[in-house]
Every structure is written in C-alpha cells, then in structure tokens.
Amino acid sequence: MTAVSAESTPPARLVHAVELARAAAVEDAAADLGRASAESAVGEHLDAVVEDPGTLTHFFAATQGGYRGWRWSVTVAAPEDDGPITVCEVVLLPGADAVTAPAWVPWQERVRPGDLGVGDLLPAPDGDERLVPGYVAVDDADLDVHIAVEVGLGRTKVLSRAGRDSAADRWFDGPHGPGTDMAKAAPGSCGTCGFFLSLAGSMRGAFGVCGNEYSPADGAVVAVGFGCGAHSDVVVEASSPVVVAELVYDDGVDLEPVPGP
C-alpha cells in the first residue's frame, strides 16, 4: 500500500500511479546512466506527498553510487477526474541524511585575514561600521585635528569608534599581545623598550610599532604589555657557557714507582 502524506485526500488514481512515476524516473536516469543502469538506479517507493488536490509527488530511493540518502521525486497530476495523468516533473532531491554540498557563502563573507594576495581587490562593504566619512568627528582629539586639515584634501573615510575598538581587540588578543608565551617570558615589556614607537590618538596608551629589526615583531603593531628577548634594556653577563672547576684532578694516568739508581 502506498503511504500518502497530506491533510487532504488526493485522487486514488494518482496514489496508485506508482509504476507510471517509476517509469518516468527510470527514463530520466537513462539520459545520464544509460538504459541498462537506469533500472537499478531507481529503488523502492518511499512516500507520496500531496501538493494540491490534483497533484501528487512520489518519492523513490536513489540507489546509484554517490547518492546515499537522495530520492527521486516524480510529480504527477490529473486536472480532471477522467483526464490523463501527466508527469509534471522528475528531479533528484536530497533526503534528511543525504550527503550534500555545504551552504553557499558569498565570497566577501569567506575572505579571512591573510587571504588577500598581489593584485586582489577587497572593497569595504556599504555601510561598514568600521568607517565614517572623513569630515565626521571620530571622538579622538588627536585624529580630529588632523582630519580637520584633511577635509576636501585627504582621506574620505576614517576609522570609527567601532572600527578602533575592533582593531584593539584583535591586536590585544593576537600574536603580539600580552598574553602570548613570548611576552610572559620576556625580560621587559614593549612599553618600556627604546625600540617602541607609540601610535597616535586614542591608541597611544595601548599600542605601538616595534622598530627593532632583530625582534620577531619588527614593523608590527605590538601591545605595550608585549615583550621579547630583544628589549633595549637587556644585559647579558659575559661568562663561559661551560662550568669550569677551580681544581681538576686527572685520574686517568697510571702512576708506577720509578726504580732507584
């Protein structure tokens, strides 16, 4: 007996049109698999769902390789009680446990820091909360002074408060933040290092740029709490790396008495 999922009862002849629907699925499969393989590609009848009072969709298991959990969906219709049954559509659809491709994610949402290469372009999205027009005060005294000079001549957009906060969080938690293993093992912090170049504006008290070519953070933004072994105040005592005892006894020589004259 054919299982039917619906609140209304469809015409009985659509419910019993299983072989007609199967034949349509086999015909569709033959276009890609060939007639010999198409018969085995359409498996058992799984279900039938009412689309409307005169339309019903039959589902068959897809048994061809690579389509685990997929179903052949065949929609049949009979507009009139005594009219011919028509096959409206044949299509393969994924079931609940089907293996499917991941949901599509727009390119601009898939880009991650470090993905941008030579020649790539990445425009800021419309309404980006990280940016505001250059003529708008950004609640940063130092930057507001410079922006006032740039009106009409300089940057058209500058970082908003949200943009600065986002950057600060990213830098603080990044590889040059105070919580890294290198910072914890350092003899001093960047905030007390002579190679530390402070940033301007509201970032001045928390971040700067490393100017030491021998530091792993050279040229990068560092938190004042970060540090490395190339701190400007590091002093290394000059001493031999090998521990030498004050008195050494060589007991590897055999001593024998010397006969007298």
Image (cartoon, grey):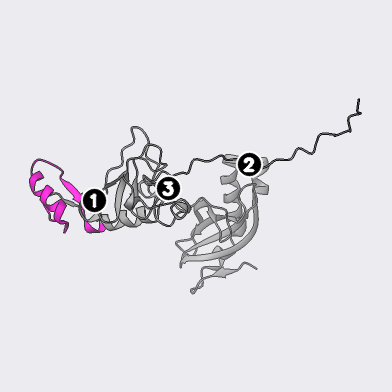
Dot placed on the residue nearer the N-terminal end, 2 or 1: 1
Mark 2 secondary-structure assignment? loop
Point 51% across, 72% down: residue: 9
Using a 10 Å C-alpha cutoff, classify the residue at mark 1 as few (fewer than 14 neighbours), some (14 to 19) or many (20 or more).
few
Who's the residue at 61% across and 54% down the image?
Answer: 22
What amino acid is found at the position of numbered circle 3 in the picture?
Cys
Give 23 or 148, whichever is nearer the viewer.
148
Q: Quadrant of the N terminus?
A: bottom right
x then y, percent, for residue 248: 70, 40
Image quarter for residue 252? top right
Instruction: Identify the element where label 3 is drawn.
Output: loop
Q: Amino acid at mark 1?
A: Asp
Q: Which residue is mark 2?
A: 244
Q: Amino acid at mark 2?
A: Val
Task: Give the magenta part as a residue range.
Answer: 136-162
Give residue 73's position: percent from left, percent from top. 54, 56
Residue 142 is one of the magenta-drawn residues: yes
**Label 1, on which residue?**
126
Q: In what element is the residue under mark 1?
A: loop
Q: Residues within 10 Å of mark 3 (few under 14, many from 20)?
A: many
Q: Residue at x 10, y 44 (%)?
A: 150
Return the residue found at the far bottom. Answer: 7
Residue at the image point whose x is 53% and y is 54% from the top: 93
Q: Is residue 211 visible?
A: yes
Sequence order check, earlier mark of 1 and 3: 1
Mark 2 and mark 3 in contact? Answer it, CB < 8 Å. no
In front: label 1 or label 3: 3
Q: Say which of 161 and 130 sits in front.
A: 161
Q: Quadrant of residue 4?
A: bottom right
Which residue position holds label 3? 228
